[in-house]
Image: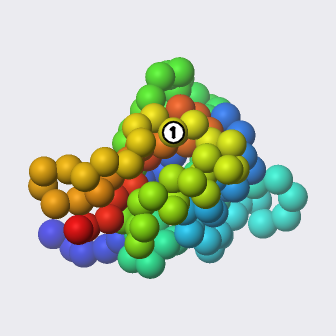
Amino acid sequence: MPGGKAFPVLYVTDVQRSLRFYGLLGYESTYQFPLEGDPHYVGLDRGDSSLGIANAEWPEAQLGISVGTGPRFELFVYVDDVDAEVERFRAAGYPILQEPATMPWGERQAYLADPEGNPVALATPI
Protein backbone atom coordinates (compact mmCIF):
# COMPACT_ATOMS: atom_id res chain seq x y z
CA MET A 1 0.00 0.00 0.00
CA PRO A 2 1.48 3.42 -0.89
CA GLY A 3 2.66 5.49 2.06
CA GLY A 4 1.79 9.07 2.77
CA LYS A 5 0.56 11.42 5.39
CA ALA A 6 -2.91 10.96 6.88
CA PHE A 7 -4.67 13.37 9.23
CA PRO A 8 -8.18 14.12 10.53
CA VAL A 9 -10.18 17.12 9.33
CA LEU A 10 -12.33 18.65 12.06
CA TYR A 11 -15.62 20.26 10.98
CA VAL A 12 -16.18 23.43 13.01
CA THR A 13 -18.76 26.21 13.12
CA ASP A 14 -16.15 28.95 13.66
CA VAL A 15 -12.75 28.39 12.05
CA GLN A 16 -11.02 31.35 13.76
CA ARG A 17 -12.28 30.34 17.22
CA SER A 18 -10.98 26.78 16.72
CA LEU A 19 -7.65 28.11 15.44
CA ARG A 20 -7.17 30.05 18.69
CA PHE A 21 -7.92 26.92 20.75
CA TYR A 22 -5.62 24.60 18.81
CA GLY A 23 -2.96 27.31 18.76
CA LEU A 24 -2.90 27.10 22.57
CA LEU A 25 -2.14 23.38 22.17
CA GLY A 26 0.88 24.26 20.05
CA TYR A 27 -0.60 23.68 16.59
CA GLU A 28 0.67 26.09 13.95
CA SER A 29 -1.05 27.03 10.71
CA THR A 30 0.75 25.68 7.65
CA TYR A 31 -1.87 26.30 4.93
CA GLN A 32 -5.19 28.05 4.50
CA PHE A 33 -7.82 28.29 1.79
CA PRO A 34 -8.62 30.72 0.46
CA LEU A 35 -5.13 32.16 0.70
CA GLU A 36 -6.48 35.67 1.45
CA GLY A 37 -9.20 36.69 3.91
CA ASP A 38 -11.23 34.45 6.21
CA PRO A 39 -10.23 30.83 5.65
CA HIS A 40 -12.73 28.01 5.09
CA TYR A 41 -9.96 25.47 5.68
CA VAL A 42 -6.69 25.58 7.63
CA GLY A 43 -3.98 22.93 7.89
CA LEU A 44 -2.21 22.72 11.26
CA ASP A 45 0.96 20.96 12.42
CA ARG A 46 2.32 20.19 15.90
CA GLY A 47 5.52 18.20 15.67
CA ASP A 48 4.65 15.04 13.73
CA SER A 49 0.92 15.60 14.29
CA SER A 50 -1.38 17.33 11.80
CA LEU A 51 -5.01 18.46 11.78
CA GLY A 52 -7.26 20.09 9.26
CA ILE A 53 -9.87 22.61 10.39
CA ALA A 54 -12.79 23.03 7.96
CA ASN A 55 -15.98 25.04 8.10
CA ALA A 56 -18.88 22.70 9.00
CA GLU A 57 -20.72 23.76 5.82
CA TRP A 58 -18.14 21.87 3.70
CA PRO A 59 -19.49 18.29 4.11
CA GLU A 60 -23.04 19.42 3.32
CA ALA A 61 -22.00 21.40 0.24
CA GLN A 62 -19.64 18.70 -1.07
CA LEU A 63 -21.10 15.44 0.21
CA GLY A 64 -24.74 16.17 1.06
CA ILE A 65 -24.25 15.23 4.74
CA SER A 66 -24.83 17.38 7.81
CA VAL A 67 -22.54 17.69 10.79
CA GLY A 68 -24.13 16.66 14.09
CA THR A 69 -24.26 18.84 17.18
CA GLY A 70 -22.77 16.40 19.70
CA PRO A 71 -19.12 15.52 20.18
CA ARG A 72 -17.69 14.29 16.89
CA PHE A 73 -14.23 13.09 17.97
CA GLU A 74 -11.76 12.93 20.85
CA LEU A 75 -8.22 14.21 20.48
CA PHE A 76 -5.43 12.86 22.70
CA VAL A 77 -2.46 15.22 23.15
CA TYR A 78 0.73 14.64 25.11
CA VAL A 79 2.01 17.72 26.96
CA ASP A 80 4.96 18.40 29.27
CA ASP A 81 2.84 19.31 32.32
CA VAL A 82 -0.87 18.44 32.42
CA ASP A 83 -1.59 20.52 35.52
CA ALA A 84 0.02 23.66 34.08
CA GLU A 85 -1.77 23.22 30.74
CA VAL A 86 -5.15 22.77 32.42
CA GLU A 87 -4.62 26.01 34.34
CA ARG A 88 -3.60 27.81 31.13
CA PHE A 89 -6.77 26.66 29.34
CA ARG A 90 -8.92 27.45 32.40
CA ALA A 91 -7.49 31.00 32.47
CA ALA A 92 -8.31 31.33 28.76
CA GLY A 93 -11.94 30.45 29.54
CA TYR A 94 -12.16 26.92 28.15
CA PRO A 95 -14.24 24.32 30.02
CA ILE A 96 -12.38 21.62 31.94
CA LEU A 97 -14.32 18.35 31.62
CA GLN A 98 -12.11 16.33 33.97
CA GLU A 99 -9.49 17.64 36.37
CA PRO A 100 -5.96 16.18 36.22
CA ALA A 101 -5.66 12.74 37.78
CA THR A 102 -2.99 10.05 37.90
CA MET A 103 -4.20 7.04 35.92
CA PRO A 104 -3.32 3.41 36.70
CA TRP A 105 -1.65 3.03 33.27
CA GLY A 106 1.08 5.49 34.21
CA GLU A 107 -0.07 8.86 32.90
CA ARG A 108 -1.40 12.03 34.46
CA GLN A 109 -4.46 12.94 32.42
CA ALA A 110 -7.18 15.58 32.16
CA TYR A 111 -9.93 16.47 29.69
CA LEU A 112 -11.00 19.83 28.37
CA ALA A 113 -13.53 20.79 25.69
CA ASP A 114 -12.65 22.42 22.41
CA PRO A 115 -14.90 25.28 21.16
CA GLU A 116 -17.25 22.74 19.52
CA GLY A 117 -17.63 20.73 22.75
CA ASN A 118 -15.38 17.85 21.63
CA PRO A 119 -13.30 16.25 24.38
CA VAL A 120 -9.54 16.83 24.26
CA ALA A 121 -7.40 14.67 26.54
CA LEU A 122 -4.13 16.10 27.82
CA ALA A 123 -1.65 13.61 29.22
CA THR A 124 1.86 13.43 30.62
CA PRO A 125 3.62 10.10 31.13
CA ILE A 126 4.74 9.63 34.73
Depicted 47 relative to depicted 50: above or below? below
Element class at badge 1 = strand
Residue at coordinates 63% horizontally, 63% vertically from top-left? 23
**Relative to residue 83, is residue 17 drawn left or right?**
right
Residue 97 lies in quadrant? top left
Image quadrant in which the C terminus is located: bottom left
Q: Label 1 crowding class (10 Å Cα cut-off): few <14, some 14-19, many 20+?
A: some
Depicted 93 relative to depicted 42: above or below? above
Residue 6 lies in quadrant? bottom left
Depicted 64 relative to depicted 50: above or below? above
Image quadrant in which the N terminus is located: bottom left
Q: Residue furthest left?
A: 105
**Is residue 110 among what the camera can see?**
yes
Residue 101 location (% of width, % of height):
31, 48
Residue 92 location (% of width, % of height):
69, 50
Residue 90 location (% of width, % of height):
61, 47
Please tell me which residue lies in front, 100 or 47: 100
Residue at coordinates 64% horizontally, 69% vertically from top-left? 29
Residue at coordinates 35% horizontally, 71% vertically from top-left? 5
For mark 1, what is the residue?
A: 96
- Colour scheme in the image? rainbow
**Relative to residue 106, is residue 114 drawn left or right?**
right
Q: Which residue lies furthest to the bottom in this view?
A: 47
- The residue type indicated by label 1 comes to Ile
**Is residue 22 among what the camera can see?**
no
**Relative to residue 87, is residue 119 drawn left or right?**
left
Please tell me which residue lies in front, 121 or 47: 121
Total marks placed = 1
Residue at coordinates 39% horizontally, 55% vertically from top-left? 122
